[in-house]
């Protein structure tokens, strides 16, 4: 959305750099080497692009502010919020508790192999080892019962949807329709990345459903509305 609104790549990187910094610090266990690599990369981009000095000063001030407030922010989180982050980093430390669901999800996807166990033949799903399999962890069911081929096929379909949405956002003439299309694509992209990422353990569990596949009438209706907005933007692509 920010890119479509006219923000440059450099400004976008500088804008989200504090968030990236916090994520790197948390994931790496405050490893200063990883932090230094990130900062050197950022300074390299700034040196090549030569942004305005005011933007650089603002970035430094924001980074210092984030550094001073990171620990108080962590302490202000509720226990369940901190547990969610810690479970994402080390799920094996609580196999029967907070880490149970993500571990079972990884087992289900891994046991599917190349072509899967067959529809309704998955042990983790059919024997109810995997909680919430019909909603947030539906991709685990796909991975176990349809295997690698089925999982990749689903991802290809989402890829086609997202790429087509991006083309619509780029090609429509009106700025309003373009922003609407970009917003719809952003929602689809976020949900796909978050859902697939959390089922395979690359992202923390956040309760994000998978478009068109996860059980739930409200989000299915939302997905249909977003699709309708994309189609409407393409239909009126020549209107300003």
Image (cartoon, grey):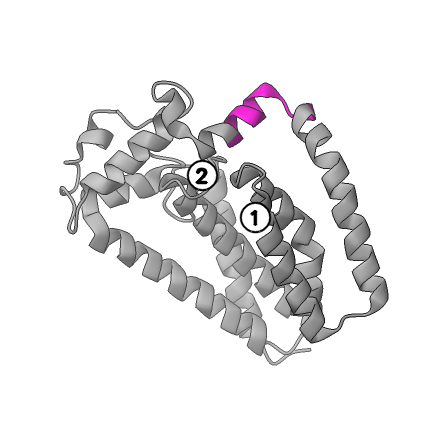
Q: Quadrant of residue 143?
A: top left
> In this view, which residue lies farthest toward the front?
33
Which type of secondary structure does the marked residue at label 2 adopt? helix
Q: Quadrant of residue 119?
A: top left
Q: Residue at x 51, y 73 (%)?
A: 167
Position of residue 64 in the picture relative to residue 216 (left or right): right
Report which residue position mark 2 lands on: 217
Is any atom of residue 3 visible in this view? no
Looking at the image, residue 176 lies above or below residue 187? below
Helix, strand or loop: magenta stretch: helix
Is any atom of residue 194 visible in this view? yes
Towards the viewer: 218 or 170: 170
Q: Residues within 10 Å of mark 2 (few under 14, many from 20)?
A: few
> In this view, which residue lies farthest toward the right?
54
Towards the viewer: 205 or 210: 205
Quadrant containing the N terminus is bottom right
Quadrant containing the C terminus is bottom right
Q: Nearer the viewer, mark 1 or mark 2?
A: 1
Across the whole image, how many numbered discs are drawn on residues?
2
Residue 138 placement (x, y as % from top left)? 33, 40
Residue 224 placement (x, y as % from top left)? 47, 52
Position of residue 74 in the picture relative to residue 215 (left or right): right
Q: Residue at x 75, y 73 (%)?
A: 50
Report which residue position mark 1 lands on: 33
Residue 216 placement (x, y as % from top left)? 43, 37
- Per the rendered image, the range of residues in magenta is 76-85
Q: Residue at x 48, y 42 (%)?
A: 219
Which type of secondary structure does the marked residue at label 1 adopt? helix
């Amino acid at each position: 959305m920010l890119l479509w609104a006219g923000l440059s790549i450099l400004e976008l990187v500088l804008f989200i750099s504090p968030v990236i910094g916090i994520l790197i610090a948390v994931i790496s266990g405050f490893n200063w080497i990883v932090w230094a690599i990130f900062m050197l990369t950022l300074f390299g981009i700034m040196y090549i692009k030569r942004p305005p000095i005011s933007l650089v000063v603002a970035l430094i001030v924001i980074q210092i502010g984030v550094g001073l407030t990171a620990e108080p922010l962590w302490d202000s989180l509720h226990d369940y919020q901190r547990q969610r982050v810690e479970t994402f980093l080390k799920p094996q430390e609580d196999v029967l508790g907070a880490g149970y669901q993500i571990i079972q999800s990884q087992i289900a996807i891994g046991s599917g192999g190349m072509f899967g166990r067959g529809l309704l033949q998955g042990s983790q799903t059919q024997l109810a080892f995997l909680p919430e399999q019909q909603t947030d962890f539906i991709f685990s069911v796909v991975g176990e019962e349809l295997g690698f081929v089925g999982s990749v096929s689903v991802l290809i379909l989402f890829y086609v949807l997202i790429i087509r949405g991006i083309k619509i956002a780029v090609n429509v003439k009106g700025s309003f329709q373009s922003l609407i299309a970009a917003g719809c694509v952003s929602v689809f992209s976020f949900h796909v990345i978050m859902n697939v990422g959390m089922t395979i353990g690359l992202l923390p569990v956040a309760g994000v459903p998978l478009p068109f596949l996860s059980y739930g009438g409200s989000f299915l209706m939302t997905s249909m509305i977003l699709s309708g907005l994309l189609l409407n933007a393409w239909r009126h692509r020549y209107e300003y």
